[in-house]
Image (tube, grey):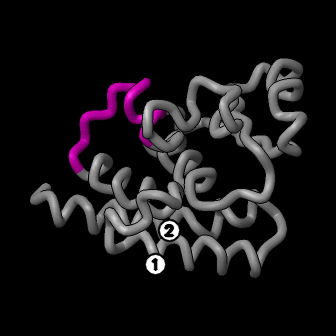
Amino acid sequence: MKWITREHIHVDRVACPWLIKKFVDTEAEFIFAPSGEVMDVAAREGAIPFDVKGQAELDHHEGRCSFESIIKKYGLADPALHGLAKIVHAADVAADRGTAPEAAGLEAIARGFGLLYADDHKILEKQFPVYDALYAYCKARSGQ
């Protein structure tokens, strides 16, 4: 399936593709479009939109970030994913930055990757291991 979000990805828009690829759709293909074009490209490509600023089901809703909305929609009950969601949320939602101590590091890493690479697909390739490591950390922390 094709999935689409805004270009120039950052914390939540990197975490979501990682989550989708690992737990929802192992064959996922990702498209990145200018903010104002996402929904039109989604319709044309038959892609599922996420993190599109109030225009997508898989977006920030009821205090959740898009990562958390995907977890809820697909019924992902893994405690480690819920722990990772707290970190992603705190790194992505400015008002909640202090709610997870790891969030500041994740935000810094995301900014750094954005400075190193202009291509969103390259950023995913390079950052997926960061999320693999955070997931392993959350699994160990939850006793899994």
Find numbered disc 2 in the image and state the secondary structure of the residue it sits on. Answer: helix
Q: Which mark is residue 105?
A: 1
Residue located at (60% from left, 55% from top):
14
Q: Residue at x 67, y 75 (%)?
A: 113
Q: Amino acid at mark 2?
A: Pro
Q: Is residue 30 left or right of residue 23?
A: right
Residue 74's x, y, as percent? 41, 26
- The count of marks equals 2
N-terminal of the two: label 1 or label 2?
Answer: 1
Quadrant of the drawing holding the N terminus: top right
Q: Quadrant of residue 90?
A: bottom left
Q: Position of residue 108 (x, y in %)?
A: 56, 79
Q: Quadrant of residue 5?
A: top right
Q: Amino acid at mark 1?
A: Gly
Q: Magenta segment: does it hold 38?
A: no
Question: What residue is drawn where x is 77% and y is 45%?
Answer: 6
Q: Which residues are magenta?
A: 68-79
- The reply, left or right, for residue 79 in relation to residue 95 is left
Residue lying at the far front of the rendered structure: 95
In x, y percent, where is residue 65?
Answer: 49, 43
Q: Is label 1 or label 2 in front? A: 1
Q: Nearer the viewer, residue 29 or 79?
A: 79
Disc sitting over residue 57 in the figure: none
Mark linked to residue 129: 2
Q: Could you say where residue 104 lies in the image, as x and y percent from the top left? A: 45, 75
- In this orientation, which residue lies closer to the viewer: 48 or 22? 48
Q: Is residue 55 left or right of residue 118?
A: left
